[in-house]
Image (cartoon, rainbow, N blue to C red):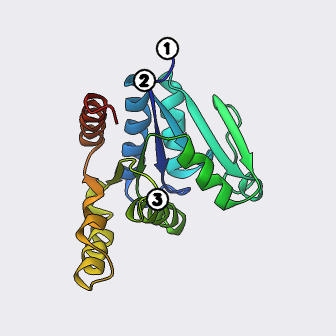
Amino acid sequence: MAKFTRSLCVFCGSRPGIDPAFSAAAQELGAALALENWRLVYGAGDVGLMGDVAHAAQDSGGETFGVIPVHLIEAEVGKTDLTKFVITENMHERKKVMFMNADALVTLPGGAGSLDEFFEVATWRQIGLHAKPIYLLNINGYWDILIAMMDHIVAQGFADQSFVDSVSVVTSVADLMTALRDDFSTRQALNV
């Protein structure tokens, strides 16, 4: 197996959700990352969309980097057969380790935990702590309400338009992979 070229941090649900398209997208993403030689960085769970994306990446020969806090190893069924498996003391450390080991970030459908992860990296970007690409994978309109909320935050004067502009919304894994390729081609050309 060739060494990975980049790493994508995937935030997603520890449950599958009710729409089968969510699991299908997670599986498609895991396989696509392996095919593109990108390493999967994620929450190290073996359940829900987390398990789907990790199994697909592994089944396709990809590298996997999982990070899980000690108190969630049982609940999220810590997936210890990853390329790299890291146990942290708490959720804050988990997010930091995932972020530090990623070149870009994407949020798939998920719950409060996924929203927490998304808003933390979006806030860090808003205040200038990083310039990593951030994507929302809006499968079947799952994130439409979040996108409207972000627009509302700007309209109500609590953020500049740059807050919304710093998040790229894609509606398919194919569009995400194209955006990642384009983003990193541009960055490479600019030596960023």
Is disc 3 placed on a helix, strand or loop? Answer: helix
What residue would you read off at disc 2?
A: 37
What residue would you read off at disc 3?
A: 121
Q: Which dot marks residue 32?
A: none
Q: Position of residue 13 (x, y in %)?
A: 51, 57
- Assess whether mark 1 and mark 2 are in contact (beta carbons under 8 angstroms): yes
Check disc 3: other Cα within 10 Å, few if <14, some if 14-19, many if 20+.
many
- Assess whether mark 3 and mark 2 are in contact (beta carbons under 8 angstroms): no
Query: Does 23 sit left or right of 70 as displayed?
Result: left
Q: In the rendered structure, which disc, 2 or 3, sits on the residue that comes first in sequence?
A: 2
Residue found farthest to the bottom? 156
Marks 2/3: CA–CA distance: 24 Å
Which quarter of the figure has residue 95?
A: bottom right
Q: Is the residue 162 above or below the residue 36 in the image?
A: below
Marks 2/1: CA–CA distance: 7 Å
Marks 1/3: CA–CA distance: 29 Å
Which quarter of the figure has residue 136?
A: bottom left
Tell me which residue sits at (26%, 64%) in the image.
162
What residue would you read off at disc 1?
A: 2
Between 9 and 101, the one lying in front of the other is 101
For the residue marked with disc 2, what is the amino acid? Asn
Q: In the rendered structure, which disc, 2 or 1, sits on the residue that comes first in sequence?
A: 1
For the residue marked with disc 3, what is the amino acid? Val
